[in-house]
Amino acid sequence: MDELLYERVAAHVEALIARGTLRGGARAPSVRKLARQQRCSVATAVLAYRTLEAKGVFEARPQSGHYVRIAARPPLPEFRATRTLAVFAAPAVSSLVAKVYGAARDPKVVNFGTAVPAAALLPVERLGRIVARLARTELAQHIHYDVPPGNVHLRRQIARRSVEWGCALGEDDFVTTVGAMEALHLALRAVTQPGDVIAVESPTYYGLLQLIESLGLRVVEIPAHPGAGLDLAALEEALAQHRVRAVLAMPNFNNPLGSLMPEANKKELVEMLARREIPLIEDDLYGDLHHQGERPRSAKAFDRDGNVLLCGSVSKTIAPGFRVGWIAPGRHRDRVEALKFAQSVGTPPLLQVAVAELMEAGGYDRHLRGMRAALAAQVQHTRDAIAALFPPGTRVSRPQGGFVLWVELPHGVRALDVHQRALAARISVAPGPIFSARGKFSGYLRLSCGHPWTPELEAAVRTLGQIVEGLAARPLARTA
Amino acid sequence: MDELLYERVAAHVEALIARGTLRGGARAPSVRKLARQQRCSVATAVLAYRTLEAKGVFEARPQSGHYVRIAARPPLPEFRATRTLAVFAAPAVSSLVAKVYGAARDPKVVNFGTAVPAAALLPVERLGRIVARLARTELAQHIHYDVPPGNVHLRRQIARRSVEWGCALGEDDFVTTVGAMEALHLALRAVTQPGDVIAVESPTYYGLLQLIESLGLRVVEIPAHPGAGLDLAALEEALAQHRVRAVLAMPNFNNPLGSLMPEANKKELVEMLARREIPLIEDDLYGDLHHQGERPRSAKAFDRDGNVLLCGSVSKTIAPGFRVGWIAPGRHRDRVEALKFAQSVGTPPLLQVAVAELMEAGGYDRHLRGMRAALAAQVQHTRDAIAALFPPGTRVSRPQGGFVLWVELPHGVRALDVHQRALAARISVAPGPIFSARGKFSGYLRLSCGHPWTPELEAAVRTLGQIVEGLAARPLARTA
């Protein structure tokens, strides 16, 4: 097919960007100006810009025109380069993780390191009023052990919300937990034995790798695409090669990629595992934090025989420190309940009831909408700042939900070096290698965008950009 | 040595009791009457009664005289009959435990089954005021993750209290946990691998057996004496026979025995294990609930090299449902912290701070004193009622702290039968076999005395006594 005129115009603009004439974050020429420069019609210029917009090169801002997003191209999925599906023992990433979290506790450090929403985005005041009332008037009812499956009031509220996930589960389908981490821990303990192989997305949240390590499990890392998440063909290959005992995945807004698995893929994943009777442990921690459109369905929505153990919590939407989560363990329910009792007896009832009342009250959906909009804006601001202030060769993910960015550094720049220099400059970031059991992603960073955008954050991104630029310029770093 | 006159008189009274002339719970003849009957001096009768009192046959009640406690003799330690130290896989006691806990949730059931103090004994109002204030005025500070080692305010309070345990630990010696169960779970995970053998007291709390089972560990059950707790000679034998990887014990008021290990034994235990580099996991959940004298020291007080992992919580003294506990993991601290993060990220900070403030406020020691007195009285009432209302052949422990009784049923009566019939009569008890990995203690019950004594409780003990009597009379039960 011959190249059309608008494609030629678009290619010209891309070339300007590639040469650095148009830098990331810059405003593009108006369509009229472009039409004049390129001697084409305004309609052709508009078509060229739409093409660039669709490719993610440009971003249209209402009443403001088009902005270059060239540095903000999604990172190349690493698996294109290295696609081996060998099994590895999970690594001891703990000491590095401890550094990231240690830094997060220091109020003087700018925290891009941990995925925590700012208190300003959480419903602190309303939740506080509810807790205060419960504490004053009915603490005697909530002071005792609340043994599994946990508080029925909360389970009802979660069940009600599960309709939005495409699940329509009942209150008896849930067991409440101490956050999603306990839910995932219970799920893994329910369906695996030490030494078993489980499949995880790569990259994946380092907390999951630590959990897997602590249980003596081995992992096979399945490449995940920044757009569509888990690579199903690679998973199928891994299932053929290894005796995989469970698959652990975040179909909705994988941490750190922010990827969203299409519904067809979710369905295929669930069916692929059901055929082989391999449990799917689904971590849907970020499912409520979509940036656009409807709340995505969970993979559990396609579960026909109780093979999916769905885990979630309110840690990213209401209160990380309340440690209120849940699991819908499907056919593994009895085992999960027994393990939960043995492990922590129960979940604090006062906090469960407080969360249930908050969810039940009018205004909770409004809170979620406001929070989603704020997080989407914070992600966009951070993305734009990275595009404008990091050196060429940087790529950054375009998450469809959640609030973390996955940044591919220019070739040869090592995330651990950036992490170290950033900490010296009182900025915390999460280095890529902690997101892999094999120490992959040495050239990646995860940046969390939990805090409302401020000049201080912009200055911190600028500093990070300078650190990366300095490392990119070192001959040694280039060959490392 | 010749038998002295007062001994002869005492023996005569014991014979009256053995023949049933004097029944358990009955008031004994006054010393004057006894002196007349036995043709001895009043001084001799007093001496005889003191002897019987010292032996636990009689109980003196101020302004009321002596009462027969014959049915309330401590149960015979079962190990005298069957002292084998073989290793067993922990059993699936879960379904039975679920029944016990299920019954406890039904408000129509009289709950002797679960070891929970009544809300009336807990500092509900003061705790509620603290939580309400924190929730209204500073929730934003307590809404985020509180990663290990946990809230420093709470750790300081626990460290301060550890002086009373003979430990004088610092705030950095502690990691806060989701109750003592999580602490014990972390301790076991830190020092064992699946398949390892650990030594436990026998009988021991069924929750520990479930925890051990869930971790794929095997147990060797070391006989525990109702008075002095863990039998150290038997433990030494077991250590010689098996490759024991950890010892888990409750030196202070073992659940279900209520036994108190003498200090010399604690010291010997700690030294025995330190020599062999076998970690001691100490569960000191009931340590604050001594009925008399000073708070007993924990075994950790004798720890010289960080070999003791001390676990505790406020579940029996402040709020079971707050799930606030701690571990002083000694030299296993790094591993415990990493496991805690992987397992549940952190403990809810709001509840930690509330407990810390309650402990810090004046009046907390007064609360503990009041609670101890109330529990001691409840234990005594229940004991007396059992003595009076259960058939001959019943024996019951004389706990030195805590609030559970260990009841030996007349020969041939099976605890599981009692448990079933009691449930039908809306009374819950904990049957002996759930306190052993080998299904030992088929003729024992644990009765909890967490609730203030009422005519309803007395009626329930009467019903239990009738159930036991009915089973004791059955020829089948006798030979079972």
Image: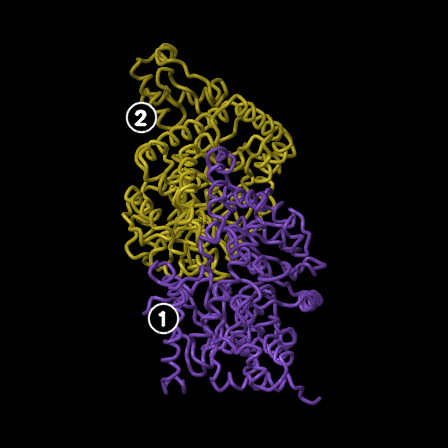
Chain colours: A yellow, B purple
Q: Nearer the viewer, residue A184 or B354?
A: B354
Q: In the rendered structure, are the residues bearing label 2 and label 1 in contact, judged by CB atoms less than 8 Å apart?
A: no
Q: Position of residue A432 (x, y in %)?
A: 54, 40
Which residue is painted at 40% across and 85% down in the image?
A: B480
Q: Identify whether A177 is placed above or below A58.
A: below
Percent coordinates x, y for residue A306 in the rendering: 32, 56
Quarter holding the N terminus of chain A is top left
Q: Is residue A261 left or right of residue B339?
A: left
Q: Is B132 on the left-hand or right-hand side of B249?
A: left
Chain letter of the residue beneath label 2 in the structure image: A
Residue B112: mark: none
**Residue A158: quarter of image:** top left
Spot occupied by residue B60 in the image (x, y as percentages of width and height): 56, 71
- Residue neighbourhood size for the residue with mark 2, other residues' Cα within 10 Å, grouped as few (<14), some (14–19), many (≥20): few
As rendered, which of A377 and B423 lies closer to the eye? B423
Q: In terms of depth relative to the viewer, which is nearer, A359 or A90?
A: A359
- Residue designated by label 1: B422
**Label 1 Cα crowd, 10 Å radius (few <14 / some 14-19 / many 20+):** many
> With B12 as the anchor, is A240 left or right in this view?
left
Coordinates of residue B387 in the picture (x, y in percent): 47, 74
Q: Is residue B367 above or below residue A48?
A: below
* Residue A381 in view: yes
The subunit carrying tag 1 is B
| Residue at which label 2 appears | A2
Image point (61%, 30%), residue name = A426
